[in-house]
Amino acid sequence: MTNAHLLKSTKMFDKVKTVHITIQANYYSVTSLHLICSEMEKCLKQWPNVIELNLCFGFNYFSRLRADRNINRYQASMQPYVKTIGELLPRVSKLVLQGATQCEVLDEWFGDLALHYSNQLRYLDRDYCIVIDTPPLQTFNMLTNLNVTFGEFANYSTACAAASQLQHLRIYNIPCSVDESLPAVKTTTIVFPELRYLLLEYPRASNVFANIKAHASLPKLKLPCLETLHILFGGNYCPVLACAVLPTSMKSINIIGQYGILSVLDKCGVQRVEKLMMTALLNPTNNASDTKNLIKSLYDCNRVTRYGCLRLDKTLTLKPEDLETLTITHLQIGMEMDSAMVIAFITKLSRLVDIKFTNVSMEDPVLNLADPEINGDIGKTVVPFAAPINSLSVNYNNNRDSTQPVPELITYLLLRLPMLRYLTANKVSAEDITKH
């Protein structure tokens, strides 16, 4: 509390806008909370201009079991500090609470603290389950920014937030099964009239939403003003995306998922997007022809207007002609290819500014890559490629000539890419290259 006493001596309390409290969870967590509140009260009964509170309980491997035992034992003793903190900091409109995913009692206590400020909060970031519904609501009806991280406990202290005011919504570690203990949303349609930014992150290792029928009763989500959408590790099927009605025009869409999620995105109503980023994860069960058609539909030059980024795994085999007419400016491709295929992709995709090949085999010579400058043939000139590529990355396997310092392909490309600024060429083993 040195900072608090320093402020008291200088009488600068009116300058304090943000309070950060970090407590290392151990045997003395409740005692530490009491000490901090007492010291703040000694400095000032109310901190009038504090609008942001960051409260973090830190856990590590050794402290968690002890903290669970301690906080559970003193659960009743913690409850009064909701009121104490509320009285000390009466004008908080931005609340960040961290650490509840490690302790069920803390989850409940954090929920009570958030509820104390619920009618004045505009920004909430916490490990806390909140049901978003349509007004009229009595709690969290002023929120414009909401960040939620799901923890490991099923019995959350839940509350409702009004969809009508939200502008930024981020939800992390979303459970992949329906939790029957959560209160049911009463409406069949939820409208987010002001929402501009939406991020949904699912557990990376999970089989996301295999049972689609379980989510058939989810309400329709109307997002008329959405500008930016991020869906991370959404698997083959994302219920929120499947239930969403997106605006016809958006600024940015970024999706990491399996190939099946392409069809869900294709049906969401977006006709134009400035920036589209797709990372397709391993899923060999999808029909390759359907996947190619979906890529062509999503990256059509009439749909993507400025920036198209596509990252494909090694399971999808494409030809340069499949992408030739599309708005793809950034491409990472994992399928195995030879030097001729590398050159074909670069020459046919004229919009490329960044390209990465992760699985290039140079075992056999496929082209005569002799360059006139190298051979001293002044009568011949090199014609540069049309694509304005400024970044090139190649992971290659070359056992044909292990003593060659620079592969012929790299030299060939360097002489034909006048706008190139960044080059990465990695020689890797056959075992390593298959991991990409």
Image (tube, rainbow, N blue to C red):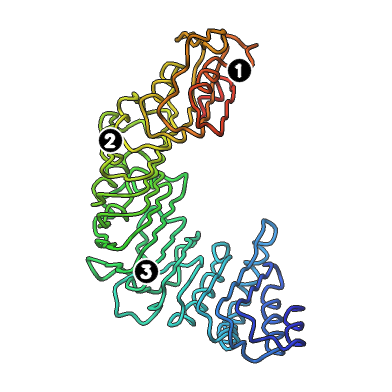
Residue 404 picture location, percent across and down = 62, 12
The answer to whether mark 1 and mark 3 are in CB contact below 8 A is no
Q: Secondary structure at mark 1?
A: loop
Give the mark, 1 or 3, whose residue is nearer the N terminus. 3
Q: Marks 1 and 3: which is nearer the front? A: 1
Q: Amino acid at mark 1?
A: Val
Q: Residue at x 26, y 71 (%)?
A: 186
Residue identified by numbered label 2: 296
Q: Is residue 401 above or below residue 309?
A: above
Q: Marks 2 and 3: which is nearer the front? A: 2
Q: Amino acid at mark 2?
A: Lys
Q: Is residue 270 left or right of residue 389?
A: left
Cα gap from disc 1 to disc 2, whole angstroms: 35 Å
Cα gap from disc 2 to disc 3, whole angstroms: 37 Å
Q: Is residue 337 above or below residue 172?
A: above
Residue identified by numbered label 3: 131
